[in-house]
Image (cartoon, rainbow, N blue to C red):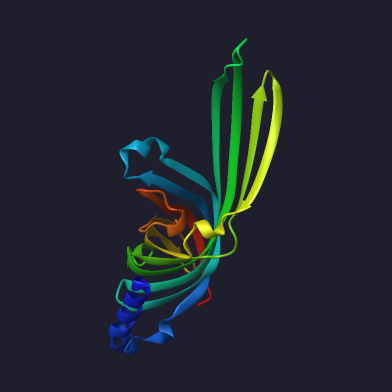
Amino acid sequence: MKRVLFALAALLVAAPAFAQLDFSALKYGLRAGVGIGSVDTSFDDEANKKMESNMTGGQFTIGAFAELPVMKHLLVTAEVDYERTGINDRVKSVHIEDTGFMPIHVFTDTKTEYPISYIHIPVLAKFTFVRDALYVEAGPQFGFLAGRVNTHVETITTVNGSDTKTVVDSDDTDHLKKNHFALALGWGFTLRKVSAGLRVSFGMGDIQAEDYKKDGSHVRHTDVQVALRYSFR
């Protein structure tokens, strides 16, 4: 909430400057891309360091943008993007059960899949150079959880060559915060009405809901994407 209030205050302060901008130069269009999203879990507690993990998955994004020149070689770009990331994790393990006669080796193979969907609103400062053909961009990105987070877990347990499969589906939407904040950095090139670029978004806050946090745990969402943009003007 503090971040939202800060953003609104910044817009009010900047309002007089925006009133003098030439909105006839406004460009707008569509944006689509693919990439890799990740969820990183870390712990402050040394005893839990071994539990740190990184889960990744394929990602796609689609949305719209508006771009306005502020001064020569400087533009402000605002977007509204829908992003869906399919996070995947796989853990294999083995343990020995003592039956009193002969030890039994028990192998487990667990696959976890859960999709995370966000509405992202990045507001970026875009600097152009080399006759405005190349650019770099940076700025804040606000994210809002969209839809349910349905976790799918498949576990195959192998004992003496015999496999047993168990499947568990659960709704873990409440495990994540409804919004998060990130820093977006990118670079790319523009050719007439089409541009292509690479962007990295670094999660700046914990996305895990407070009720489900473990002591000293931090969960952050980061993504890397390649996207194309098409401007209608």
* Quadrant location of the N terminus in the rendered image: bottom left
The image position of residue 164, as x and y in percent, is 70, 30
- Above or below, 101 relative to 204: above
Tell how many labels: 0
Q: Quadrant of residue 203?
A: bottom left
Q: Is residue 222 visible?
A: yes
Q: What residue is rendered at 41% in x and 82% in y?
A: 25
105 or 66: nearer the viewer: 105
> Closer to the camera, 172 or 72?
172
Q: Is residue 88 left or right of residue 180?
A: right
Query: Which quadrant would residue 21 be assigned to in this image?
Result: bottom left
Q: Residue at x 40, y 40 (%)?
A: 52
Q: Position of residue 147 (x, y in %)?
A: 59, 64
Q: Position of residue 13 (x, y in %)?
A: 28, 84
Question: Quick check: can you spot residue 193?
Answer: no
Q: Position of residue 204 (x, y in %)?
A: 35, 58
Q: Is residue 43 left or right of residue 233?
A: left
Residue at position x 70%, y 27% in the image:
163
80 vs 10, nearest the viewer: 10
* Residue extending furthest toward the top: 101
Task: Pick out the residue farthest to the front.
Answer: 100
Residue located 47% across and 49% down the image = 38
